[in-house]
Image (cartoon, rainbow, N blue to C red):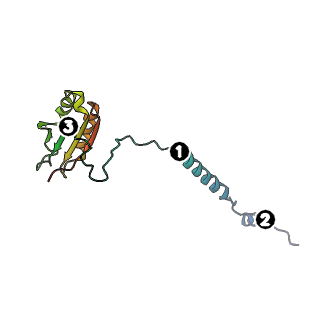
Amino acid sequence: MHARTHEEQIVVERSERRAPHVDMTPMIDCVFLLIIFFMLATTFAPLPGMRVKLPAGDPGPTKTPTLTLRISNPAAGQSEGVMVLNSQIVNLDSVFATFMNLAPERKDMLAIQSGRHVMHDQIVQVMDRAKRAGVGRIAFAKVAQ
């Protein structure tokens, strides 16, 4: 046998060392189990909104609305269309007060007729003000052509 010098022994020890091997399989299993747990444990809150029941077809002459709000298409350069409640011109600032001043029996149903280019924001604001003023039901009607 041949005796190694101290320097040769150090070189041989360094070359024989290997990098440590880490098995990633258990960690990946734990991550997948956590993902499954959080997917099952998470509850999603329903988004607040308004329930809108649209007619399946022509509803027929079931009930005549006591209030009819017509919103015309906005003119060029305007963001809101002109609103006519029955035969009275109203705007978003005055529509709440107008609804509040109505007799309770006239607040049973509001039918909204709007043009194609009316912004949804204007319609939603009218619906919000009508509900806060005590209007019972809100319906959407086709604009007479």
**Percent position of residue 61, x then y:** 24, 46
- The residue lying at 69 percent from left, 62 percent from top is 19
Q: Quadrant of residue 96?
A: top left
* Mark 3 lies on residue: 67
Label 3, label 1: how many angstroms apart (C-alpha)? 44 Å
**Percent position of residue 11, x then y:** 74, 66
- The residue lying at 64 percent from left, 55 percent from top is 29
Query: What mark, if any, has residue 42 been given in the picture?
Result: 1
Sequence-first disc among 3 and 1: 1
- Dot 2 crowding, Cα within 10 Å, few <14, some 14–19, many 20+: few
**Percent position of residue 135, x then y:** 27, 33
Q: Secondary structure at mark 1?
A: loop
Q: Amino acid at mark 2?
A: Gln
Sequence-first disc among 1 and 2: 2
Q: Secondary structure at mark 2?
A: helix
Label 3, label 2: how many angstroms apart (C-alpha)? 100 Å
* Mark 2 lies on residue: 9
**Percent position of residue 93, x then y:** 18, 33
